[in-house]
Amino acid sequence: MKAFILAAGFGTRLRPVTDRIPKPLITVLNVPCISYTLALLKEAGIDTVICNVHYHAERIRGFFSENNNFGMDIRISEETTILGTGGGLKRCENLLSDEPFLLINSDIIADFDLKTFIDRHRSSGNSGTLMLFETPEAETIGDVGIHEGKVRDFNNMRDTGLRSQYIYAGAAVLSPSIFRYLSAEFSSIVDTGFTGLITDESLGYLRHEGFWKDIGTPQNLWKANIANQHNILAFGKRINRQTGIRPHTHSSTAVISQGATVRESVVGRDCRIEDGACIEHSVLLPGTVIEKETFIQRAIAFPGGMLSAD
């Protein structure tokens, strides 16, 4: 089975962090976010990956190259004009039209069991199976309407009146039949492909009962690093086993002055914390310099700036 990783977005809600780095390469516990996705794919025995890129495409290409593609066959689909989740997938139809494939986001951290997910799809007879996750934030994020084992709606856009506490968790197993519903223009796969499969009554789902977090906002990025730290460290061995990168709180290349105080924080690669600085419940992304006597609390710091976690 092949996989398609969505990695072309602008990361608008994370600006100005994403002015310099694409969202898939933002670190969570000192691991680039896309590495969590790659680890899950390798663990499931998937070694052929198509990854669409657009914003900071050269940075993502460079990351793969520096890590020898993590031993995988990674093919890049570079979009000169961004095509969205629907158009980006449609562009690669010729690479994915021979068998079911896995679609997955590059900006999520989760302990998915993709082998079980794939097996569930194969035994279902459906043309698509979505990974769903239960959260009290479903109404804000956009809930998925389900009924009798099928996905029937997204955020009530089809006026079914079906509401739930489940959201689409950013992973799907799809038959090539989805391509007949996709548009080559900029489009959302929810509005085109998923809706088409719903019309065919052929879109199933699997509930993910484990850990899941997206990093699309400053608050969620902070939570993944700080509030959810123990959850991620709990499956860190799985990530390390597949990628050689281990989630950890303090990078070995960071320089922390003896007179500095660091409490319950994440310190990234090549960071420098000068004498008298105090860091509490914060995330220092790679290359950040915290000057003398600076106090930071509940923040995300990066070269040239800082975002509040609140």
Image: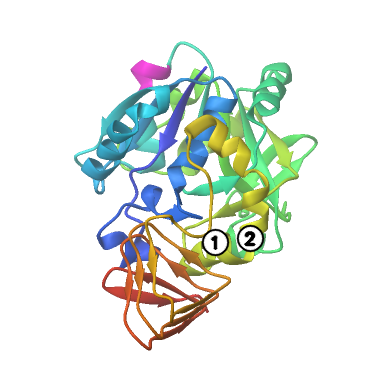
User: What main secondary structure does the magenta stretch of the protein show?
Assistant: helix
Residue shown at 62% from the left, 59% from the top: 229
x then y, percent, for residue 310? 52, 79
Mark carried by residue 44: none
Q: Which residues are magenta?
A: 92-96
Taking the view exactly as shown, the residue that stands out farthest to the top is 98
Which residue carries the number 1 mark? Answer: 225
Contact check, label 1 and label 2, Cβ < 8 Å = yes
In the rendered view, would you say 285 is above or below 77? Answer: below
| Disc 2 element | loop
Mark carried by residue 228: 2
- Is 10 left or right of 150, judged from the image as shown? left
Q: Residue 205, can we see it? A: yes
| Disc 1 element | helix
Amino acid at dot 1: Asn
The answer to which of 231 and 255 lies nearer the viewer is 255
x then y, percent, for residue 109? 56, 48
Task: Count residues near mark 2 (Cα–Cα under 10 Å), then give few for <14, some for 14-19, many for 20+.
Answer: some
Separation (CA) of disc 1 from disc 2: 6 Å
- Is 176 left or right of 79, judged from the image as shown? right
The answer to which of 250 and 157 lies nearer the viewer is 250
